[in-house]
Image (cartoon, helix red, strand yellow):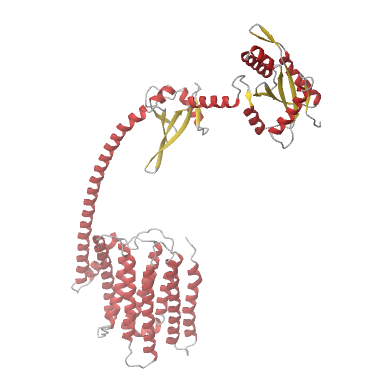
């Protein structure tokens, strides 16, 4: 529940405004009580007007505001202010054309306008029968209370007193307020905040009615004990408005303040009263019984109508369910062949992630005997194990590769399982691997090419990496003398021998023609030369091709990786070192200048 900040802040102020003058009037008899009562009433009216305006501004922020209700409440308060002014003039002046009846009529108009505002609040989409029944229930309560009040007043009031039409107006005002109060609770299920607010607002009207009735029949008692009742009226109205402002956004449904099933019990007090009374015509008892009989007839008709509507709705619902069931069966007959005959394996999982159905392709892949999965096979268990890690692709034990696609199954916005589609991408992945292999490998020798060297360079170049460019000596003579077939044989054999002598952290590449690249590491220049010579020895060995012995050597240029440089710059340094050997004695190793 929200904290009642407005109520806590303002209601004590109103209480002090009301209580302090009362205590002053009792403490100092020289101060006229009527003056204090009138001043307190005007101050409370001003504060209530302020509270109504605050509620009106706060209601404007709601999606469905109730601004008109508060405007009507403000109009009702305005009439009360005018009535209070006339009452003050009547009490403190001797104007002949102003009487107490004038202020009473204005208070009555204010009362009716406020009742209309409450009726404006309870307009809803209820049926005519519900309105009639609520009207009857409220009427029973009002008549019962009016009869009780009549019997009490009949025994207390002097029968010679005749205050018509003043007394009639007071009775009508009070009865209408009571009727609207009960009608509101019977016709509309509302929030406890609205019920509390209405109760306090009605309490102010009821206090006004009691005050007016007492002033008619018990003027001495009213002038002595009920002089400050109008202040209580303003307190009740203020409490209602403040309570509503603080709880304008909250509230929970609650039941009526009066149980409608208890209404027939109201006839019991009147029945026992007339059993004990020796005289009387018992008209009021017959009125209550007559209203209860009419009420029972209305309830019976309403219940019959409700039962008839329920029967009609049940028949319509049963017909809908039957049609929907037939539609579902027809849909299943159409969908099942599509499910079974789909070329991709499809498995239906329930909400517990258990496989329950498989189409023919899935049955073939996972070794399932039928569409309904009664026992999990090893292949299906292997898939379930892979799915627990949240993979988007799957490779079975036969090296078949599948892309996984999930389609959730939702019925009435509630997930009930999913379909898992396994799209076979084995051929596509093989083609992709072949394309990737040819993109990064030399078509003749099978070793990596220049594009692979670029990829390696961009991925990682350790601090002690060295690049060696290898150029074959005498290769052009072999090509010209024995033909390109012999030259291709030599290139393939050189690539095989270089690859065979590689260590785990080394790699060799064919850059084009008879030029190769070699990546290695070394701690110093001596170990670097030793490693290059060891790798070049197999190249210098003879080659046998179609009975011919072929001989070649290699010139090697090595360069250390230049920090923050490009691959082209690195290759340029190694190329300079290689050409130094090529233009001197050949069959040697040259290292580009660097610092160890």
| Between 299 and 262, the one nearer to me in the picture | 299
Q: Quadrant of residue 452?
A: top right
Image-based side of 313 in relation to 484, left or right: left
The residue at the far top in this view is 547
| Between 444 and 583, the one nearer to me in the picture | 583
Number of labels in the image equals 0
The residue at the far front in this view is 480
Report x, y in % for residue 172. 28, 76
Q: Quadrant of residue 446?
A: top right
**Relative to residue 524, is residue 310 depicted above or below?**
below
Report x, y in % for residue 325. 28, 38
Image-based side of 216 in relation to 399, left or right: left
Please indicate, yes or no, whether residue 506 appears anywhere in the rendered image.
Answer: no
- Residue at horizontal 34 percent and vertical 30 percent from the top: 338
**Relative to residue 481, is residue 464 depicted above or below?**
below
| Between 281 and 232, the one nearer to me in the picture | 232
| Between 252 and 171, the one nearer to me in the picture | 252
Report x, y in % for residue 296. 21, 60
Which quadrant is the C terminus positioned in?
top right
Report x, y in % for residue 52. 42, 72
**Relative to residue 61, is residue 506 depicted above or below?**
above
Please indicate, yes or no, whether residue 224 appears anywhere in the rendered image.
Answer: yes
- Residue at horizontal 69 percent and vertical 35 percent from the top: 566
Q: Quadrant of residue 144?
A: bottom left
């Amino acid at each position: 529940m929200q904290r009642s900040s407005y109520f806590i802040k303002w209601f004590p102020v109103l209480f002090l405004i009301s209580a302090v003058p009362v205590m002053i009037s009792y403490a100092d008899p020289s101060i006229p009580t009527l003056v204090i009562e009138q001043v307190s009433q005007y101050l409370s009216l001003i504060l209530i007007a302020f509270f109504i305006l605050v509620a009106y501004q706060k209601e404007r922020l709601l999606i469905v505001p109730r601004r008109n209700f508060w405007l009507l409440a403000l109009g009702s308060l305005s009439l009360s202010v005018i009535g209070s002014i006339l009452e003050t003039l009547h009490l403190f002046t001797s104007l002949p054309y102003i009487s107490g009846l004038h202020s009473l009529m204005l208070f009555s108009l204010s009362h009716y306008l406020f009742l209309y505002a409450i009726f404006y609040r309870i307009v809803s989409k209820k049926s005519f029968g519900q309105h009639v029944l609520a009207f009857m229930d409220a009427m029973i309560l009002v008549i019962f209370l009016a009869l009780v009040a009549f019997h009490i007043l009949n025994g207390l009031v002097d029968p010679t007193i005749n205050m018509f039409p003043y007394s009639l107006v007071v009775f009508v005002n009070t009865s209408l307020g009571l009727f609207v109060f009960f009608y509101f609770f019977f016709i509309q299920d509302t929030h406890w905040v609205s019920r509390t607010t209405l109760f306090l607002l009605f309490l102010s009207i009821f206090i006004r009615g009691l005050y007016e009735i007492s002033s008619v029949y018990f003027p001495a008692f009213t002038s002595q004990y009920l002089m400050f009742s109008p202040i209580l009226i303003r307190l009740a109205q203020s409490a209602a408005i403040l309570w509503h402002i603080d709880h304008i956004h909250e509230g929970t449904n609650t039941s009526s303040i009066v149980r409608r099933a208890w209404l027939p019990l109201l006839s019991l007090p009147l029945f026992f009263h007339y059993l004990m009374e020796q005289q009387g015509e018992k008209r009021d008892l017959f009125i209550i019984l007559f209203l209860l009989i009419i009420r029972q007839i209305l309830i019976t008709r309403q219940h019959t109508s409700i039962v008839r509507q329920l029967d009609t709705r049940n028949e319509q619902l049963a017909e809908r369910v039957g049609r929907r069931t037939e539609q579902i069966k027809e849909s299943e007959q159409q969908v099942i062949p599509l499910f079974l005959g789909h070329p991709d394996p499809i498995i239906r999982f329930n909400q517990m992630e258990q496989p329950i159905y498989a189409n023919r392709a899935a049955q073939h892949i996972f070794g399932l005997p039928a569409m309904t999965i009664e026992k999990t096979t090893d292949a299906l268990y292997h898939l379930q194990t892979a799915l627990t890690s949240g993979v988007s692709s799957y490779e079975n034990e036969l090296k078949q590769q599948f892309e996984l696609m999930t389609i959730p199954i939702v019925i009435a916005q509630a997930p009930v399982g999913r379909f898992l589609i396994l799209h076979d991408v084995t051929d596509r992945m093989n083609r992709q691997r072949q394309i990737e292999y040819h993109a990064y490998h030399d078509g003749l020798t099978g070793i990596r090419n220049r594009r692979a060297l670029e990829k390696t360079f961009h991925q990682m170049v350790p601090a002690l990496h060295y690049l060696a460019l290898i150029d074959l000596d005498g290769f052009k003579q072999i090509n010209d003398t024995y033909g390109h077939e012999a030259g291709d044989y030599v290139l393939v054999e050189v690539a095989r021998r270089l690859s065979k002598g590689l260590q785990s952290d080394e790699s060799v590449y064919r850059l084009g023609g008879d030029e190769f690249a070699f990546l290695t590491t070394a701690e110093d220049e001596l170990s670097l030369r030793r490693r290059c010579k060891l790798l070049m020895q197999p190249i210098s060995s003879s080659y046998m091709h179609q009975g011919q012995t072929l001989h070649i050597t290699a010139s090697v240029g090595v360069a250390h990786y230049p920090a923050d440089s490009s691959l082209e710059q690195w290759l340029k340094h190694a190329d300079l070192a290689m050409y130094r050997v090529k233009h001197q004695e050949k069959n040697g190793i040259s290292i580009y200048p660097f610092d160890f």
